Amino acid sequence: MLETYITNLKKSYMKPFIILLMIITIFCNTLALIVTKAWAEVPIIIYIVLAIWFVSCLVIMKQDSFNNIKVDELSALRYLIVNVFVGYIQVVALSAGYVIGNAYLYWDVLSYWLEMQVAIFMSLLGLIIFSLNEFHIAVKSAKRWLNMIAILLKLGSFGILIYLNFTAPRAGDENLFIWGLVIVIICIDALLLRSFLNYALFTDELRNGPTKFENKDSAKEPLE
């Protein structure tokens, strides 16, 4: 089963969703910049983030396949880190649409965008804590208080984003990007939970043999 787990980890099935997000992000941001001609008004950090995002998309395109699968713990960790980083950089890149959409007004919206990044980081931290705890990656048995912390971080993250939706300045429908962040986070989390689960199954079987997560009934011999 080691090959199955690490194959599921490497083949994250994020590629179709990321391709869709790439199309939306590139089309919307390029269209906004062409219409407003506000290329120079966009903070340099936004261009840097989008460059990192684009490179990360190319990385996941190469990784998300059934080719060149390495069955070892270091490779499994690398696959997981790539999945998590690429998954959440999608949210960061999408949030850049808020800054680009308002750049032509010369408003100082960067501080609001940074608040969005705090919310995104809280969501990521909640996902990591929950996964490391619930899938027994960092603990031998799940701790309820760790799950509570993860849930509070998630709720706090969504709370900040919803608050910004009503308080952040905007010229038109740029707040749709903020609502879009919540939807994308939920979708990315679902895909990443799958990655964390397969990483947990792989490392557990690698270290302890195929016993911990296996269904006990599967080990029973059929009766004659």
Image: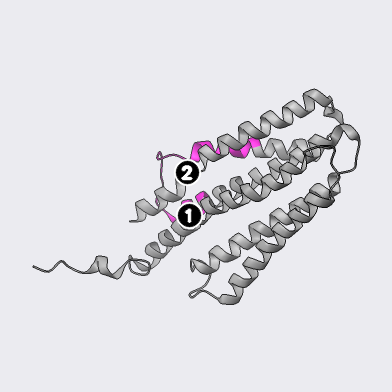
In the rendered image, which residue does mark 2 sit on?
Answer: 13
Q: Amino acid at mark 1?
A: Arg
Q: Which residue is mark 1?
A: 194
Quadrant of image for the N terminus: bottom left
Residue closer to the observer: 131 or 181 = 181
Q: Quadrant of residue 66?
A: top left
* Residue 80, image x, y percentages: 52, 52
Q: What kind of colouring is applied to the model shown?
A: one colour
Kindly identify the residue that appears in the image at 73 percent across and 46 percent down: 178
Q: Residue 169: where, in percent of width, then height?
A: 86, 45
Tell which circle, 1 or 2, labels the residue nearer the N-terminal end. Answer: 2
Q: Are marks 1 and 2 in contact (CB under 8 Å)?
A: yes
In this rendering, the answer to whether 8 lies above or below 29 is: below
Kindly tell me whether residue 99 is visible in this rendering. Answer: yes
Q: Main secondary structure of the magenta part?
A: helix
The amino acid beneath tag 2 is Tyr
Query: Going 66% across and 50% down the picture, which residue do you hit?
Result: 182
Report the front residue among 216 and 7.
216
Q: SS at mark 2?
A: loop
The quarter of the rendered structure image containing the C terminus is bottom left
Residue neighbourhood size for the residue with mark 1, other residues' Cα within 10 Å, grouped as few (<14), some (14–19), many (≥20): some
- The answer to which of 172 and 83 lies nearer the viewer is 172
Compare residues 9 and 117 and report the one nearer the observer: 117
Magenta segment range? 54-79
Which label is found at residue 77?
A: none
Question: What secondary structure is found at the residue carrying circle 1?
Answer: helix
Q: Is residue 170 rendered to the left or right of residue 69? A: right
Q: Is residue 58 visible?
A: no
Tell me where residue 93 appears, x and y as whole percent.
69, 41
